[in-house]
Amino acid sequence: MRIALICTTILILTACGDEQSDQSADTSNLSVNSPVTALLDRKSRGSALTNTPISFADATGETSKMIEVGPCPFVSDETIKASVRTTFEITRREVSNTECRWAYNAGFVINVTIEDIVTAKPVSERRYNIGVDTVSTPQDGPGTHAAMINDTAWGKLMPFAYSFEKDGKLVFIRYTGFKTGADIMRPAANEIAARMSTAPTIRHQRRHKTEPFKACDVWSEHDLKTVFGASETAVVAPGARSMSTCSWKIYEDGVSGQRTAAFNFYKREAGKKQEHEYDSYKPYSADGETHYLRKSNSSFGTYIHIITPRPEGLVHVTVSDPEKDPSAIAKVLQKNLLSRMVP
């Protein structure tokens, strides 16, 4: 990972501003009586913070499992996949008695809904592109009011949906990203029409990965207020998160901007130069380990990045402060994380 991409890669900064690197990691500007200094002076630094164990395997998703969903009760995967012209691998993502969804990714989706006609949004008001009118091409079935719906954004008719009504229900088959047409959508519509009234009742299911690690539970609001020396009235807001990272923003009256804290756990990228191996990171030793620190300044304040390599992967903390050097805070948080790590 290159330094220029650090904001995006680890999801921990709201903006980089006009950041400039500063190799110095001097913390001499800390008040002798500050909460951070008190924490640093403890026999076990970081011990005042949450100390529940953190499994590196859990935090990096190694133990996460994909929870698959059962079949759609009113149309088969084979029929749905045959309704588009693609070589992409389409997987079933969500099922219920009123909606089923398949996708390749977020840009290529097939969604089938069965709604009560009286409460459903009229087909004439449904759009593929916002603000772009659609054109309906009537079809001879199934049910009544069957139609293929076309987008007109590109100056020609582009099929993106098939709809029909039956037994007081509006069925709408919507395609996002995929190429399709009436000839291949019709078999899907026919199968839905034949099966919908006798479909077995199922519970709603969504394909998802288990999350054995809750990233934003690593530190409590009290932890962050303590380490930043913030008042009880300060607002601590979790920000960007993923399975292995979380960021927080601290807002407080009397502080000119927001303070931030974030962490990330990740595996080494084989064959690639690691971020901490660039010259902008300076090594230092503490607690029997070598850590790498990068200090930078921007219009938002001073940012401190600390990366500690471990056999199982890398532990990365980032802290920012709009008014002062947060090096000591970053070291306290990094110390806390490292003391809690288990395989």
Image (spheres, rainbow, N blue to C red):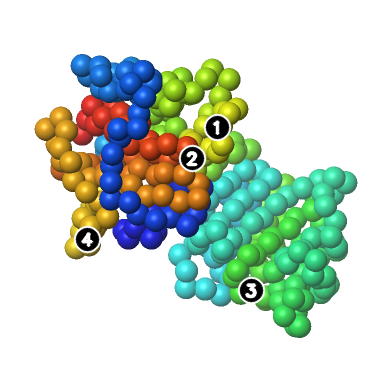
Asked whether residue 171 is in view, the answer is yes
On the image, the x and y values in percent for residue 142 come to 77, 63
Q: Of the residues shown, which amino acid type is indicated by label 4?
A: Lys
Crowding at mark 1 (Cα within 10 Å: few <14, some 14-19, many 20+): some
> Number of numbered discs present?
4
In contact (CB < 8 Å): disc 1 and disc 3: no
Locate the N terminus and report the quarter of the image it occupies.
Answer: bottom left
Q: Residue furthest bottom?
A: 155
Q: Nearer the viewer, mark 4 or mark 3?
A: 4
In this view, 105 is above or below 230: below
N-terminal-most mark, 2 or 4? 4
Residue on which disc 3 sits: 180
Mark 3 Cα-neighbour bin, 10 Å: few <14, some 14–19, many ≥20: some
Query: Looking at numbered disc 2 in the image, what kind of residue is underneath it?
Result: Pro
Q: CA distance from mark 2 to mark 3?
A: 53 Å
Q: Earlier in the sequence, mark 1 or mark 2?
A: 1
Q: Which mark is residue 255?
A: 1
Q: In which quadrant will I find the C terminus?
A: top left
Q: Looking at the picture, which amino acid does disc 3 mark?
A: Thr
Task: In the rendered view, tell whether residue 152 sits above or below residue 141.
Answer: below
Quarter of image, res 48: top left
- SS state under label 4: loop
Residue highlighted by disc 2 = 322
SS under mark 1: loop
- The CA distance from mark 2 to mark 4 is 31 Å
Residue occupying the point 50% across, 46% down: 300
Please state the horizontal and vertical placement of residue 208, each as a whole percent of the image: 47, 44
